[in-house]
């Protein structure tokens, strides 16, 4: 396993992050525990979750599964860089949800109980809260850090200017601010190259891509469809219909390289200079095993150029749309 620092921080994390959104609604608790054990065996020390994950099992169910795994001991918590999120609401009651100081304190304590730990290594704002001023958010985080409940702060699904505003407010308070931004980023969805990545790099944030295979579309979906192994519906089916030619070219190129399409998609992200660790979200042990293969895929300049040709990216603003 390769490791790197998370943004400008001194925190060392694996180049792959274990996403846990499937734990509970799609993957049983025993199987989830086995996958987390295997992740540690592979050297993956960076686990990502959120207070709202749990699906049909209810708000917080995924954190509870992780907490039960930590409680089995064996140094599991100590070996894990634990990232969770705040923003989602467990109810419609006033002050449940978003980023008020009230909710940050309440949600943090609830996550700590479910996760059966005394601190969160990376506490991430799951979405921007346009109604709460940054001074209030940072005051709440400073208190959490002083109490030993949080070590680092990160954002998720922020625009570039949101990152800039957050960091400027943190600087006024002589506070460290954000060390990471978690965004959707993959060969098919490259919008964050426009302004989010430049803002993150300028402010010392590491990028943690979610949906690195774009819901499975970059995992060989054309071939699987032909073989009758997968049938898409909804947004994924619409995207396949409009991007089929590019996806066919992509899968053919992956064959030329001698790799599975999903491995190439993850490897491409690992070759992007702003990326700290793509989030892999396995439902099964086999999917975890497959994702780790990407660490052995090396893409030279010609291969990277070919992928840019198949899936054109975005230039940094304003050059993307102006001279």
Image (spheres, helix red, strand yellow):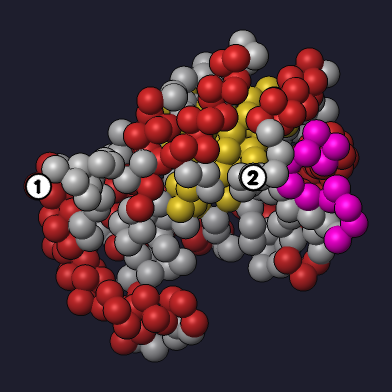
Horizontal side of residue 241 vs 116, given as left or right: left
Q: Secondary structure at mark 2?
A: loop
Mark sitting on residue 273: none
Where 187 falls versus 319 (above or below)?
Answer: below
Q: Secondary structure at mark 1?
A: helix
Front-most of 292 and 236? 236
Residue 301 painted magenta: no
- Per the rendering, the mark at residue 130 is 2
Decide if residue 25 is on the left or right side of residue 310: right
The magenta segment is 92-103
Picture residue at 52% right of the left edge, 19% below the top: 9
Report the side of 262 relative to 64 (left or right): left
For disc 1, the marked residue is: 302
Say which of 163 and 220 sits in front: 163
Q: Could you tell me how far apart the alpha carbons at marks 2 and 1 are, in whole angstroms?
A: 43 Å
Choose top left, top right, bottom left or bottom right for residue 1: top left
Assess disc 2: are there few (<14), some (14-19) or many (≥20) residues with their C-alpha within 10 Å of its C-alpha.
few
- Using the image as rendered, state which of residue 175 and residue 35 is in the foreground: 175
At which x and y percent is residue 98? Answer: 74, 47
Q: Residue at x 55, y 58 (%)?
A: 282
Tag count:
2
Q: Is residue 93 above or below residue 45?
A: below
Mark 2 vs mark 1: give the one in front. Answer: 2
Q: Is the magenta region chiefly helix, strand or loop?
A: loop
């Amino acid at each position: 396993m390769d490791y790197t620092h998370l943004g400008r921080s001194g925190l060392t994390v694996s180049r792959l992050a274990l996403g846990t959104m499937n734990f509970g609604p799609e993957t049983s608790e025993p199987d989830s525990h086995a996958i987390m054990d295997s992740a540690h065996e592979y050297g993956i020390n960076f686990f990502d979750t959120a207070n709202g994950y749990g699906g049909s099992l209810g708000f917080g169910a995924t954190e509870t599964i992780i907490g039960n795994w930590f409680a089995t001991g064996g140094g599991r918590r100590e070996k894990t860089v634990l990232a969770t999120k705040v923003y989602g609401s467990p109810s419609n009651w006033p002050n449940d949800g978003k980023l008020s100081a009230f909710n940050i304190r309440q949600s943090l304590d609830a996550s700590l109980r479910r996760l059966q730990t005394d601190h969160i290594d990376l506490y991430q704002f799951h979405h921007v809260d346009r109604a709460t001023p940054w001074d209030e958010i940072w005051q709440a985080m400073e208190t959490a850090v002083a109490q030993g409940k949080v070590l680092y702060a990160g954002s998720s699904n922020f625009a570039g200017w949101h990152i800039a505003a957050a960091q400027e407010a943190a600087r006024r308070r002589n506070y460290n601010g954000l060390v990471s931004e978690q965004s959707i980023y993959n060969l098919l969805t490259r919008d964050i190259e426009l302004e989010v990545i430049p803002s993150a790099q300028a402010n010392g944030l590491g990028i943690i891509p979610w949906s690195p295979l774009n819901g499975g579309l970059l995992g060989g979906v054309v071939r699987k469809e032909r073989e009758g192994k997968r049938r898409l519906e909804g947004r994924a089916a619409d995207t396949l219909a409009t991007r089929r030619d590019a996806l066919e070219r992509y899968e053919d190129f992956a064959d030329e390289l001698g790799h599975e399409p999903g491995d190439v998609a993850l490897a491409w992200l690992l070759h992007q200079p702003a990326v700290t660790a793509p989030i892999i979200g396995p439902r099964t042990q086999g999917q975890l095993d497959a994702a780790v293969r990407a660490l052995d895929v090396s893409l030279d300049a010609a291969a990277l150029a070919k992928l840019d040709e198949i899936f054109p990216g975005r230039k940094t603003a304003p050059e993307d749309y102006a001279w």
